[in-house]
Amino acid sequence: MTFKGLKPIAYGGREVWPLIEGGKGVSATNHASSGAWAAAGGIGTVSAVNADSYDPAGKIIPQVYDQLTRKERHEQLITYAIDGAVEQVKRAYDIAGGKGAININVLWEMGGAQQVLEGVLERTKGLVTGVTCGAGMPYKLSEIAAQYNVSYLPIISSARAFRALWKRAYHKVSELMAAVVYEDPWLAGGHNGLSNAEDPLQPEDPYPRVKALRETMRKEGVSEDVPIVMAGGVCYLREWNDWIDNPELGSIAFQFGTRPLLTHESPIPQGWKDALRDIKPGDVLLHRFSPTGFYSSAVKNPFLLNLEARSQRQIPYSRVEAGEHTVQLDVGVKGKNFWVTPKDRDRARQWATEGHTEALKTPDDTVVFVSQQERATIRKDQTDCMGCLSHCGFSSWKDHDDYTTGRLADPRSFCIQKTLQDIAHGDDIDQNLMFAGHAAYRFREDPFYSNNFTPTVKQLVDRILTGD
């Protein structure tokens, strides 16, 4: 039984369910999950963000960066990314068996995004139906889509962002824009598009925001047949009943990012799957520790709590005695040009007695206190940077011009490539970043998952189609 009002949509020359698998980078979605999603009649999404390649025996090829310079390691990364995504697309397409559709997903802020996207599309002609792309303002997305004759689905989080992209570029290639993905900045997992005008602690109802997006699309002459994809916080279609067949919103599709993680075909390790069953309301934190500079949502595990604690062990300083900075910092630093308040000096001395003996400078004229071991890890990770982002706050890498952001490397952040590779291919869910959407607590409450039941992707899609 299909949930009332839900109808297939035309996409890529065939009818598919308006259900999209969210593409989760660095191997959290792969050919197995996306191919199965398409085979079930939906739109599967292969992540083209540092996807896995395989050796002739079918084993995952570890992404080892042995070149001396960051720029050389960055070139290695791009090669890995293209080879991996091509392999994943081909395998997903085979699994789909002509049903549904296969999209690829890229982050515009990933290192070498344009090069990777063009490299993948060049080698997968006829296999990829569309490209979803967010995390930044991907103006060139429509131009690249036109070059390879694929659909594009920009990911935005406000009507304002869509209007800027449309005016600058997308109106020239309107016929290939297959949908607009509204990713709710307070509900989605992974990186979120919160603007400086929005309060991370004051979530806004998505309905008026999506209504405003549709109004903007109408004003710009975008066809009513172009769906808006609601992404972030989508769990059960019955909760979105008033969105379906709603003339104010027009055609609506739904993206599921977190629910497909707990399936047989999901490539994440068993420990991560088990942890999803225990997440409670409030266990997913919207934070700003990511080296991208974006807000992002992840599970409050020891890794994230340690980043929070590190930033709390932070004090401002001046190079000269000025204002309230009347005493010199005498722990954690070398040299005498660190002037702080007497209260902050006392706090720093206390942190030092607790083992946080090393003070590391941040780009904001503050120092954070860490242990010797933590300092060594931070410095090694910064040195090993392989340029996975277009701009990295943690290592000060930039993927063009002079290859530096010109800012001090920020020890309050972390190497995102390292931690996402480690959690996807290992099983340490405590000491790595574990992305999840804010509705992940529903696994714990849903009888569908009781007695450790893990559905196949087909069983999950069938379940979603009933409204549950």
Image (cartoon, grey):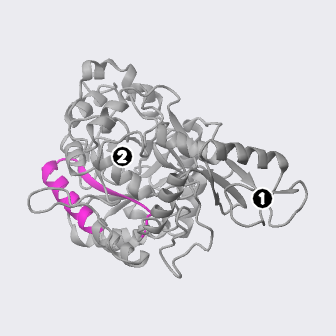
The quarter of the picture where the C terminus appears is: top left
The quarter of the picture where the N terminus appears is: top left
Q: Secondary structure at mark 1?
A: loop
Proximity of marks 1 and 2: CB atoms separated by less than 8 Å: no
Q: Position of residue 230 (x, y in %)?
A: 45, 42
According to the image, label 1 marks what residue?
Answer: 317
Q: Check the image and name the residue furthest to the right.
A: 323
Q: Is residue 193 magenta?
A: no
**Amino acid, disc 1:** Tyr
Q: Which residues are drawn in magenta? A: 82-111
According to the image, label 2 marks what residue?
Answer: 22
Report the side of 126 relative to 377 (left or right): left
First along the sequence among labels 1 and 2:
2
Residue at x-position 39% and y-position 63%: 175
Q: Position of residue 112 (x, y in %)?
A: 41, 71
Q: How many angstroms separate mark 1 from mark 2 (CA)?
A: 43 Å
Q: Position of residue 43 (x, y in %)?
A: 28, 47
> Against 77, is 19 above or below?
above
